[in-house]
């Protein structure tokens, strides 16, 4: 059986709830003197491409977007370009990708947050007068996920030339999420 504790941490002046036989063994939640609640074990991640581009994206196929660097990953729930929900709940997920060399001959582009339960998409119709150097596509969603459900990012180009790149700039291309409730 696992022991849990609730106690006052005099060194930080906070009320601490955690697991283990003594205060401070593992803090699950802390409430400081100002009433601010922190949950250091709460599932959360932020990953980026770390300057690694994905060039000349295939047209007519869903391509999984790769993320090479974790900025943070509480509980190690992100791996192999996929987030795996550790518990059932509502998860805030967000992706932003900078596209480069947008092809006006393409019929459309769509970006997907693909989860085990549902796909969430944003679509772009590139009816511009000339090919664009850059544009950003973004999706944010509150997704219902069960324990062990997964979420990853896909990109699709319908028609045109396979010339569009996913720019790896960390300021524009990233994927993040956290458990809300």
Image (cartoon, rainbow, N blue to C red):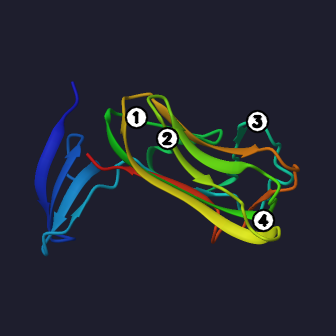
116, 8: nearer the viewer = 116
Residue pointed to by mark 1: 86
Residue 141 in view of the camera:
yes
What is the secondary structure assignment of the residue under circle 2?
loop
* N-terminal label among 3 and 4: 3
**Alpha-carbon span between mark 2 and mark 1:** 7 Å
Q: Position of residue 114 (x, y in %)?
A: 54, 37
Q: Quadrant of residue 168?
A: bottom right
Residue pointed to by mark 2: 77
5, 143: nearer the viewer = 143
* N-terminal label among 2 and 1: 2
User: Is residue 89 found left or right of 1 in the rendered image?
Assistant: right
**Alpha-carbon span between mark 3 and mark 2:** 27 Å
Tell me if mark 4 has few (under 14), some (14-19) or many (20+) residues whose alpha carbon lies within 10 angstroms of its own. many
What is the secondary structure assignment of the residue under circle 4?
strand
Which numbered dot is residue 61? 3
Q: What's the residue at 12%, 73% (across, down)?
A: 33
**Alpha-carbon span between mark 4 and mark 1:** 35 Å
* N-terminal label among 4 and 1: 1
**Alpha-carbon span between mark 3 and mark 4:** 18 Å
Q: What's the residue at 41%, 50% (across, down)?
A: 141
Which quarter of the figure is the C terminus placed in? top left
Residue pointed to by mark 4: 100
Q: Position of residue 21 (x, y in %)?
A: 20, 40
User: Is residue 148 found left or right of 33 in the rendered image?
Assistant: right
Q: Quadrant of residue 53?
A: bottom right
User: Is residue 8 found left or right of 132 in the rendered image?
Assistant: left
> Marks 4 and 1: CB-CB under 8 Å?
no
């Amino acid at each position: 059986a696992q022991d849990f504790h609730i106690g006052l941490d005099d060194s930080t002046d906070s009320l601490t709830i955690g697991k283990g036989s003594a205060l401070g063994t593992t803090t699950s939640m802390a409430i400081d003197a100002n009433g601010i609640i922190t949950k250091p074990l709460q599932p959360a991640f932020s990953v980026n491409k770390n300057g690694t581009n994905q060039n000349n994206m295939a047209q007519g196929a869903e391509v999984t977007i790769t993320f090479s660097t974790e900025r943070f990953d509480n509980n190690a729930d992100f791996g192999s370009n996929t987030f795996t929900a550790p518990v059932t709940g509502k998860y805030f997920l967000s992706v932003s990708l900078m596209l480069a060399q947008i092809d006006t001959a393409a019929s459309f582009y769509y970006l997907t947050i693909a989860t085990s339960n549902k796909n969430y998409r944003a679509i772009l119709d590139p009816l511009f007068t000339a090919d664009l150097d850059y544009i950003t596509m973004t999706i944010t969603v509150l997704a219902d996920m069960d324990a062990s459900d997964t979420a990853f990012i896909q990109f699709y180009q319908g028609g045109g030339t396979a010339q569009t790149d996913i720019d790896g700039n960390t300021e524009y291309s990233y994927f993040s999420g956290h458990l809300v409730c």
